[in-house]
Amino acid sequence: KGRGEALYRSEKADPEDRSEKADRQVVLGINSGIVPVDWLRTSRTSAGDANTGDQGTITLGEVLARPTYEVIPTKGTDEWVDDLPEEGKVTITCSPAQGIEGTVRLAERLAEQGFRVVPHVSARLVVDEGHLKEIVERLGNLEVKEIFVIGGDAKNPVGSFSSAFELLSAMSDLGHGFDEIGVGGYPEGHPLIDDDALRQALLDKQRFATYVVSQMCFDS
């Protein structure tokens, strides 16, 4: 498996079945690359030289005991989530193709089914503070207590936010009811951003964040 990752297969799936239908039942890579932001404050862990020492060691058993499942808001997702455990914790990605609206709508549907949803909010897909307020209010109505804030993959911002730090700052000024806020850490670097910029961004974001997530690695 990829470093710090595992794959979840529904109990309904036959482990020997390699058909396309069975492959669709492999829902998610379970992310264990989560570091409490307090560790960053004490060790100054940052992009390019991230190292949490023994504190960061997590066994596979610990990962599987508290899995988080990630879904992409695409056609057919509602059918696939039927394979997830009831009341499971599900993160919902945010992409330029689907936009923020696709993420929030899927969060609404999954929350109604009893899942604990963790929407990704891409700064570059938020138009302005009014749009941000609407997103926060809609997630608040769902009693969402955790979100993951990223800059996003959109080449050009659709509005006034170009980075996760800018969105986090605006969200703090606006006020919100989230207990947990995750941010990206990129310990192995980023193809489009140099290490010094990533390091500074991580230090800037830590005042708003409660944990940092590294890249996810998957094996086919």
Image: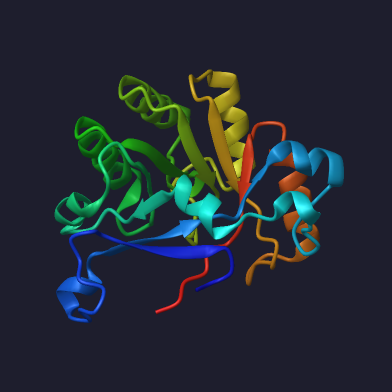
Residue 36 is drawn in which quadrant? top right
- Looking at the image, the residue that sits furthest to the right is 43
Foreground pick, 219 / 119: 219
Residue 183 is drawn in which quadrant? top right
Query: Relative to 89, is 202 on the left or the right?
Result: right
**Colouring scheme, one of rainbow, by chain, secondary structure, one colour:** rainbow
Residue 28 is drawn in which quadrant? bottom left
Query: Relative to 41, is 208 on the left or the right?
Result: left
Query: Relative to 44, is 185 on the left or the right?
Result: left
Query: Relative to 112, is 99 on the left or the right?
Result: right
The correct choice, above or below, for 74 with respect to 168 in the image is: below
Q: Name the residue at 20% across, 79% down.
A: 17
Report x, y in % for residue 124: 49, 48
Report x, y in % for residue 111: 26, 33
Report x, y in % for residue 149: 52, 42
- Placement of the C terminus among the 4 image quadrants: bottom left
Foreground pick, 195 / 178: 178
The correct choice, above or below, for 183 with respect to 174 in the image is: below
Q: How many numbered marks are there? A: 0
User: Can you see residue 89?
Assistant: yes
Report x, y in % for residue 122: 47, 47
Q: Name the residue at 47% across, 28% down.
A: 129
The correct choice, above or below, for 195 with respect to 119 in the image is: below
User: Can you see residue 52?
Assistant: no
Q: Name the residue at 47% across, 72% down.
A: 218
The correct choice, above or below, for 184 with respect to 166 in the image is: below
